[in-house]
């Protein structure tokens, strides 16, 4: 890499002369070695003559020195001198050229910094060569110099800076080992070192100057060719290497990253990308940010609507107090347990719930939870409507049930034509009335806080039964069909509702004694016959020790009715026959039937009343299920 | 997720519902820093939390300079409710002593490959640690992901963090192909020549998520409008990867029971 880097840096001029190439490389070596150049530079600026005299020695310090001397006459010198010539105008004779170089090197350096990039093209050794070529011009007297300089000038103002920068580059390259941070200074040094280099060569090579007479012209052409090549626009992207390198180096020098050499490729890519993004900036941003803005707007509405209600706040306070629990407070407690959605989201959910209670006649509302889906998630709210404000139930679902019965009867009637089907579809079990059993609460869902709430339909026993047998992901869209076996009667909204019902029935627990049955004194352990399906808070509840709560599961009880295998909480006897009622948890007898009609709620696996049964009994149930499955 | 940005990352990944309580978070911050110092890791990642019946495991991983080199995994075991015994052991396949809890799940027998040999008759007591290690390893190999461009490969073969990584753009963030598995590539060689031509060898040296089997085992969602992209694995439920487009923030965390979702194909 050093060598290539070297060459790269020495892109000052182009030379097709291979010898000059070598020279250049050798010069580079000289350049590298020359740390004392700094002094030389400063010295040279002040006292060009003296400065000039120094470099030769310094440069010759490294072994490369002698080589350069021997190489074709002061080609580098020409490089150095040319810019000087250009700047200082023609007529600079050989002797003055060295002095001029330092001075010009200074000013060019200032320019070079800006046009630094311009000359920086990946002209490799050619630049070196060109530089090498210029010294001879000095050597060859002004005419040649002028010629060269003019040719350089034709190359353009870039050419000046080009050369200068090249010098600076060499300069940079020289102290490269030291550090990159002081590029300008280095440029200065480099330029001067180059000059000196060339000068030294020049001095030494004077005798040989004649040999390089033709070199400048060719050099000139070479430079132009190389530059033209670099400026050629790419057929694919419309960029050209010259500009690209300029920009890259500008960026590096501006940002001064650590170890730029290691990330140079990335920088190059970034520069290229920056081209494109400028053009499409506005368009792209519009498209991409639009959904963000939309949701922000919606959520802003959430925040605002709270404020709008300001006037009626006090009036509705009572109702809202009852209706909406303190979501933030619950979230705080959950967070202590390591469960939660993050404060932001919880607050938005709180606002969304508030919006829900404002728009619907709701007595009690609770944040039930969040269900993750493939494309979108569901935020679920458990709601209890006010008395009498219940949404009308759609009775259509009963119709198909009746039709099924009708069909089976029709089949039976057609004795003549078709073989009689003995199959009678089991009567579909009617779903529970609202406010009872599995449909005790109504559930609303939304995909994201701010989106409108959608009410989920009531759940039917058949749906629960099938939901127990299938396992599917939610997609996030309520109307997605559920393709499964056994076939699920309904779409995603029904499946969601069924799962919610199952989760509620299985996992909603409370501390023993917190709720109690209405009529009786709240004595928790009592197993009350006849089961209840309603409970209320126990005003005498005093709390249980945390240690007790944690160590024994029997201190927690279900407060949601267990769902029978039938799919309902309250037994519905389709056969209209009464059978033995069994209250114990006979795991095998999951199909036992209770008294018809009466206080149903006998859950198979739970001891005693299904409601307010300790969850320690669940383990028994689970084990029983497992045993059954194993059989 | 990186230990340095733990708090922010936890907030971003909280959409899945499982997080950490404030006291855990605080203690994690300090302990991760200590781990980094003691083991001289280059980076320490908080890998996640595996929920158990009685206790949870908090897992941290330490990375050395080379990002794909084998990582050291440390676990911290906290028993509920009160016992605060914390043990940290370096896991590289070997273990030192462990309270052998065994989960009730029947998977226990199938997890370790060594197990399969014995499955016939002998019921081998598998230490929980062993199972833990293998589960973490499986999860890492299967679903640990990084965005494209966050790591790059040098010509010498070592893999480093890309300091100029500025995040995926929004359009890229929604595509599965912009995310790579954080492990040695397996399928790279199977790509067609056309695909290989488009790949950048310094960036595309890992398998992308596109060809994961089964298809659809990743769920990509944009949260907070388009300000956050969250990928959740359906194969290992509980693995959440988050990334804020156009920024350097990204990370993944696993909070779950440590069970593979074998029913995945049926659930899709």
Image (cartoon, coloured by chain):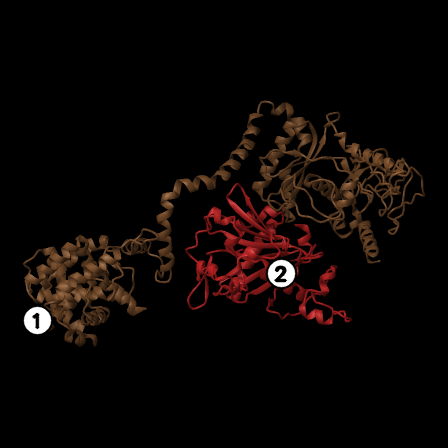
Q: Colour of chain B?
A: red
Place of residue A599 in the rendered image (x, y in percent of width and height, measured from the top left): 88, 36
Q: Nearer the viewer, mark 2 or mark 1?
A: 1
Across and down, in percent, residue A12 comes to: 20, 62
Name the chain letter of the residue that bears numbered label 2. B
Q: Nearer the viewer, residue A311 or A584?
A: A584
Place of residue A106 in the rendered image (x, y in percent of width and height, measured from the top left): 16, 57
In the picture of the structure, the residue carrying the numbered disc 1 is A210
Q: Does dot 1 land on a helix, a strand or a loop?
A: helix
| Chain letter tied to brown | A
Residue for point 54% across, 63% down? B187
Residue A226 higher or lower than A373, as above or below:
below
Is the residue under label 1 in contact with that under label 2 (CB below 8 Å)?
no
Determine if residue A42 is in view.
Answer: no
| Residue at numbered disc 2 | B76
Quadrant where the C terminus of chain A sits is bottom right
């Amino acid at each position: 890499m050093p060598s290539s880097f070297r060459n790269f840096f020495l892109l000052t001029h182009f030379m097709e002369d291979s010898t000059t190439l070598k020279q250049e490389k050798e010069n580079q070596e000289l350049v590298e070695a020359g740390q004392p150049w700094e002094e030389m530079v400063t010295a040279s600026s002040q006292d060009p003559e003296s400065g000039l005299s120094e470099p030769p020695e310094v440069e010759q310090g490294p072994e490369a020195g002698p080589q350069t001397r021997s190489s074709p006459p002061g080609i580098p010198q020409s490089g150095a001198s040319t810019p000087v010539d250009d700047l200082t105008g023609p007529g600079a004779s050989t002797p003055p050229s060295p002095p001029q170089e330092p001075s010009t090197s200074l000013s060019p350096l200032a320019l070079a910094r800006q046009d630094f990039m311009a000359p920086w093209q990946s002209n490799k050794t050619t630049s070196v060569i060109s530089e090498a070529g210029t010294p001879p011009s000095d050597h060859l007297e002004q005419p040649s110099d002028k010629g060269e300089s003019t040719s350089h000038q034709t190359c353009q103002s870039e050419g000046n800076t080009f050369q200068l920068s090249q010098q600076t580059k060499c300069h940079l390259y020289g102290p490269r080992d030291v550090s990159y941070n002081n590029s300008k200074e280095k440029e200065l040094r480099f330029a001067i070192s180059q000059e000196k280099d060339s000068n030294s060569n020049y001095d030494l090579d004077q005798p040989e100057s004649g040999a390089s007479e033709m070199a400048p012209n060719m050099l000139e052409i070479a430079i132009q060719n190389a530059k033209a090549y670099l400026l050629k626009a790419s057929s694919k992207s419309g960029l050209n290497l010259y500009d690209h390198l300029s920009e890259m180096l500008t960026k590096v020098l501006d940002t001064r990253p650590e170890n730029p050499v290691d990330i140079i490729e990335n920088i190059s890519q970034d520069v290229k990308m920056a081209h494109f993004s400028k053009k499409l900036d506005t368009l792209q941003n519009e498209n991409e940010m639009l959904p963000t803005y939309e949701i922000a707007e919606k959520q802003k509405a959430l925040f605002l609507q709270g404020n709008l209600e300001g006037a009626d706040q006090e009036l509705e306070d009572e109702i809202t107090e009852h209706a909406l629990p303190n979501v933030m407070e619950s979230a705080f407690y959950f967070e202590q347990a390591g469960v939660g959605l993050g404060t932001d989201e919880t607050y938005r959910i709180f606002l969304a719930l508030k919006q829900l209670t404002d728009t619907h006649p709701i007595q009690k509302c609770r944040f039930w939870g969040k269900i993750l889906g493939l494309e979108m998630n569901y935020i679920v709210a458990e709601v209890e409507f006010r008395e009498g404000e219940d949404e009308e139930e759609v009775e259509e679902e009963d119709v198909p049930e009746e039709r099924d019965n009708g069909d089976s009867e029709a089949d039976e009637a057609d004795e003549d034509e078709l073989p009689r089907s003995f199959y009678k579809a089991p009567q579909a079990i009617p779903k529970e009335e609202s406010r009872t059993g599995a449909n005790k609460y109504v559930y609303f869902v939304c995909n994201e806080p701010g989106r409108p709430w959608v009410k989920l339909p009531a759940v039917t026993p058949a749906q629960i039964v099938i939901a127990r047998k299938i396992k599917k992901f939610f997609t996030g869209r309520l109307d997605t069909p559920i393709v499964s076996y056994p076939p699920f009667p309904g779409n995603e909204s029904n499946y969601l509702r069924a799962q919610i019902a199952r989760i509620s029935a299985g996992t909603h627990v409370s501390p023993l004694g917190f709720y109690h049955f209405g009529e009786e004194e709240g004595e928790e352990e009592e197993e009350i016959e006849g089961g209840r399906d309603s409970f209320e808070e126990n005003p005498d509840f005093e709390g249980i020790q945390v240690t007790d709560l944690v160590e024994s599961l029997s201190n927690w009880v279900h407060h949601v009715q267990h769902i029978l295998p039938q799919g309902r909480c309250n037994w519905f006897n389709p056969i209209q026959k009464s059978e033995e009622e069994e209250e114990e948890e006979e795991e095998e007898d999951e199909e036992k039937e209770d008294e018809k009609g009466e206080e149903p709620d006998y859950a198979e696996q739970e001891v005693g009343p299904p409601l307010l049964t300790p969850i320690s009994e669940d383990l028994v149930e689970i084990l029983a299920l497992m045993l059954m499955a194993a059989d | 997720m990186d230990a340095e940005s733990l708090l922010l990352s936890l907030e971003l990944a909280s959409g899945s519902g499982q997080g950490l309580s404030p006291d855990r978070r605080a203690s994690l911050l300090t302990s991760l820093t200590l781990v980094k110092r003691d083991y001289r890791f280059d980076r320490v990642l908080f890998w996640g939390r595996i929920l158990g019946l009685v206790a949870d495991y908090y897992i941290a991983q330490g990375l050395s300079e080379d990002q794909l080199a084998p990582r050291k995994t440390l676990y911290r075991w906290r028993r509920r409710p009160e016992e605060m015994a914390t043990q940290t052991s370096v896991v590289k396949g070997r273990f030192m002593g462990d309270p052998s809890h065994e989960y009730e799940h029947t998977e226990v027998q199938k997890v370790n490959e060594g197990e399969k040999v014995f499955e016939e008759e002998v019921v081998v007591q598998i230490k929980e640690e062993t199972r833990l290690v293998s589960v973490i390893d499986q999860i890492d190999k299967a679903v640990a992901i990084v965005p494209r461009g966050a790591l790059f490969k040098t010509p010498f073969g070592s893999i480093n963090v890309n300091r100029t990584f500025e995040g995926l753009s929004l359009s890229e963030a929604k595509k599965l192909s912009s995310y790579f598995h954080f492990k040695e590539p397996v399928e790279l060689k199977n790509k067609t020549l056309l695909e290989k031509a488009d790949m950048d060898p310094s960036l595309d040296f890992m398998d992308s998520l596109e060809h994961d089997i089964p298809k659809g085992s990743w769920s990509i969602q944009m949260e907070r409008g388009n300000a956050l992209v969250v990928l959740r694995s359906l194969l290992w439920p509980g693995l959440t990867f988050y990334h804020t487009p156009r920024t350097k923030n990204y990370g993944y965390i696993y909070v779950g029971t440590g069970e593979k979702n074998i029913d995945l194909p049926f659930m899709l």
